[in-house]
Amino acid sequence: MAVKEEKIEMEGEITESLRNRMFRLRLDNGHEMIGYTAGRMKRYRIRMLPGDRVRVELSPYDLDRGRIVYRLR
């Protein structure tokens, strides 16, 4: 059985709200990327605005897109 690839978790801040539940993010290390909402965030309709802090999962293969998995307070 194949081993599932490891995700990289980082924290950042939403800088811009785009369409289709996508956001422009600035990570704590200064990197800018596009983030989209994860399944549970969509299911429970968690609202996010520019300025909110979020936790993002990144694939090691594509560091320019990530999945927002948690909104921090």
Image (cartoon, rainbow, N blue to C red):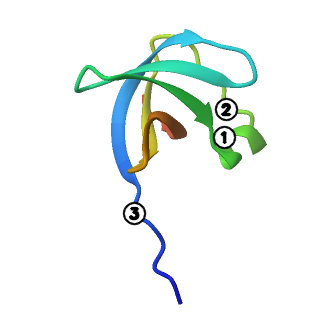
* Viewer-nearest residue: 69 or 22: 22
**Which structural element holds mark 2?**
loop
As displayed, is residue 69 above or below residue 25? below
Q: What amino acid type should be assigned to the residue bearing mark 3? A: Glu
Q: Position of residue 56 (x, y in %)?
A: 44, 39
As displayed, is residue 2 above or below residue 35? below
Marks 3 and 1, how far apart at CA:
21 Å
**Which structural element holds mark 3?**
loop
Question: In the rendered structure, which disc, 1 or 2, sits on the residue that comes first in sequence?
Answer: 1
Marks 3 and 2, how far apart at CA:
25 Å
User: How many C-alpha atoms fall within 10 Å of the one at disc 3: few (<14), some, or many (≥20)?
Assistant: few
The quadrant in which the C terminus is found is top left
Question: In the rendered structure, which disc, 3 or 1, sits on the residue that comes first in sequence?
Answer: 3
Q: What amino acid type should be assigned to the residue bearing mark 2? A: Ile
Query: What residue is pinned by disc 3?
Result: 6
As displayed, is residue 57 above or below residue 71? below
* Viewer-nearest residue: 14 or 31: 31
In the image: residue 56, left or right of residue 12: right
Disc 1 to disc 2: CB gap under 8 Å: yes
Query: What residue is pinned by disc 2?
Result: 46
Marks 1 and 2, how far apart at CA:
5 Å
Name which residue lies at 54% across and 30% down.
Answer: 35
Q: Name the residue furthest bottom.
A: 1
Query: What residue is pinned by disc 1?
Result: 41
Q: Position of residue 59 (x, y in %)?
A: 44, 49
